[in-house]
Image (tube, grey):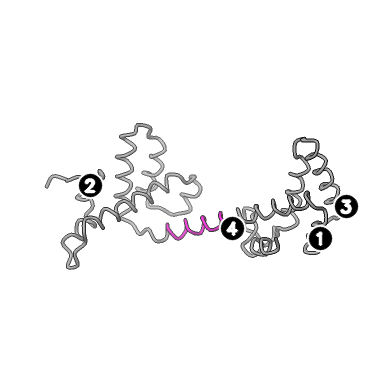
Amino acid sequence: MKPKKTNSGIDFSYDANLASKLSADEPVSKTQLKAEADQQQALGVRLTELPKDKLLKLDLPEAVLTAVLDTKKITANGAIRRHRQYLGRLMREIDNAPILEQLARWDGKHTAENAYFHGLERWRDRMIADTSVLAEFIALYPQTDIQQLRTLVRNAQKELAANKPPKSSREIFKLLRELTSNQDDGDVDGNSNDDEIDDLTSKI
């Protein structure tokens, strides 16, 4: 039978799994099938945005991995659209659950790290605006070199007043990160773990 295309350009007749749902005991609407197909295609597109090292960690089937990597080589708009549809069909043939779980872990870690860095920025900005905040931070992190931090804060205040590049401000951020992170308990990339992030942000 000649393949039929929908208005979205996605050809359901190419997908045996989706086509079989139309004849199943429990009817599935074409609208639902289209939504599922769009979701699978969107997941495939998401994979094309990942760096190669992360793609390899997903343990993708060879055909899917090849299709994802080939996407980066295509430049023509029409060819990109057709290739994404092909990638979507491949995604519908595999179990997406492990992929979605790993992506969720990466997304969650990224969000937590952003919160951690924003927390450091808030500490730094508060110190520069009000030196009394130094005592608050030192009480939480007694291993702090008090003289070093005070000197950096004073220099940052002078740079801010003179409208100079924020060299000392960057040094404060670096120092705060060193003081609040635990490299032994962090992951292999040297990032702070979730407990450290929660602990830091709760004290701001």
Question: From mark 2 to mark 4, how far is it between C-alphas?
Answer: 39 Å
Mark 2 vs 4, N-terminal side: 2
Which of discs 2 and 4 lies nearer the camera? The answer is: 4
Q: Which residues are magenta?
A: 99-113
> Which residue appears farthest toward the top when viewing the image?
76
Residue type for callout 3? Gln
Would you call the spot at circle 4 few (<14 residues within 10 Å), some (14-19), or many (20 or more)? some
What is the spatial separation of the Cα atoms under label 1 and label 3, in whole angstroms? 11 Å
Residue at mark 1: 138
First along the sequence among labels 1 and 2:
2
Quickly name the residue at label 2.
11
Q: Disc 4 and disc 3: Cα gap in Å?
A: 31 Å
Identify the amino acid type marked 4: Ala
**Which is nearer the N-term, disc 1 or disc 3?**
1
Residue occupying the point 45% across, 44% down: 49
Q: Position of residue 104 (x, y in %)?
A: 48, 58
Question: Left or right: where does residue 140 sit relative to residue 31?
Answer: right
Q: Amino acid at mark 2?
A: Asp
Q: Which mark is residue 112?
A: 4
**Relative side of 98 to 120, left or right:** left
Name the quadrant containing residue 58. bottom left
Give the quarter of the figure containing the C terminus: bottom right
Q: Is mark 3 in CB contact (under 8 Å) with mark 2?
A: no
The kind of residue tagged 1 is Ile
Q: Which residue is mark 3?
A: 147
